[in-house]
Image (cartoon, helix red, strand yellow):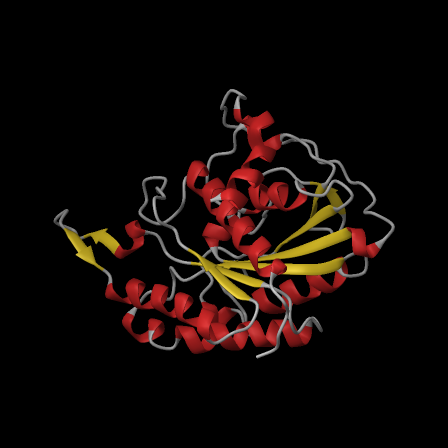
Amino acid sequence: MPLLSLLLLALLPAAGLRAQVLKPRLRQVINPPVRKEKFQLYLLIGQSNMAGRGAVEAQDTVPNRHVLRLNPAGQWEIAKDPIHFDKTVAGVGPGLTFGRLMAAPDTSLTIGLIPCAVGGSGIDAWTPGAYFEGTKTHPYDDALARAKTALQAGTLAGIIWHQGETDSTPEKSASYQSKLQALIGRLRADLQAPSVPFVAGQLPAYQINKPRADGQAQVNESAVRLNEAVAGLAKQVAQYGYVTAEGTTDIGDHTHFNAVSARLMGQRYAVAMKQLQLKPKRKK
């Protein structure tokens, strides 16, 4: 599609770098743009596939002064993978590619990424006051606090959400759509951004067709139902879009995107976000 082709041009300088597993030892803290309207912020939320578990390579640490991330201390720094810090295994997720592509069309803008995903967290952990034992954090409350810190310097331009692995069970998937819709409404209200674009991601095929103990494939109908819920909200929620995970590959655990697939998801999030931003805003 034309929009995707245009955005992908932004990644060409990094594409030829030799792949190597590494994580940046140095992080450069810098001041954000003085004008808030020139500093567009994106909230990155969900669980481990938003946080990223792909192996970090050289192309994932190339600095771009137009793409910043809010670090754990609440400071702005030049974004490099890992963007997230939920667990020590954090690696390549969709966030950095998404940020680079959102920054590409207009060099007068700076993109600020607000990483808040929490590996293993179910959607119930994304409610006010909810405590997640897996990381001993409060996912929703922490994300809201970090977003408000970021908003002191910039303007909220969008939210991307990738979550659902934890909720792809019969009992949880049945109520997933209503809970996601409630989360979108709650975030928009709490951040005083009633029409901010929100893009969600679907689960990949390897989450749907999981091998049993005997090695035979077994269809997880709950994952299918969850994907249907994510897609169905497009007809119910304004300024909402979703991306598929078709053609993605895992790291060998039938759970997490590898680095190539995580970057592909970042590309899809950027295209979907751009499309929403071009639409006339309406409340629903």
Q: Residue at x 68, y 32 (%)?
A: 63
For this orientation, the residue located farthest to the right is 34
Residue 1 or residue 137, whichever sits in front: 1
Which quarter of the picture shows residue 189? bottom right
Q: Position of residue 269 (x, y in %)?
A: 52, 51
User: In the image, what residue occupies the spot 57% across and 79% down?
Assistant: 284
Q: Residue at x 51, y 74 (%)?
A: 237
The reply to whether residue 166 is visible in this rendering is yes
Q: Quadrant of residue 275?
A: bottom right
Q: Is residue 124 above or below residue 254?
A: below
Whether residue 134 is visible to the viewer of this picture, yes or no, is no
Query: How far from the left and from the top, in percent, is residue 49?
Result: 46, 51
Q: Residue at x 72, y 43 (%)?
A: 106
Q: Percent from the top left, x then y, of residue 92?
A: 51, 40
Q: Is residue 233 above or below residue 29?
A: below
Q: Nearer the viewer, residue 250 or 282?
A: 282
| Image quarter of residue 42 | bottom right
Left/right of residue 98 with respect to residue 206 in the rendered view: right
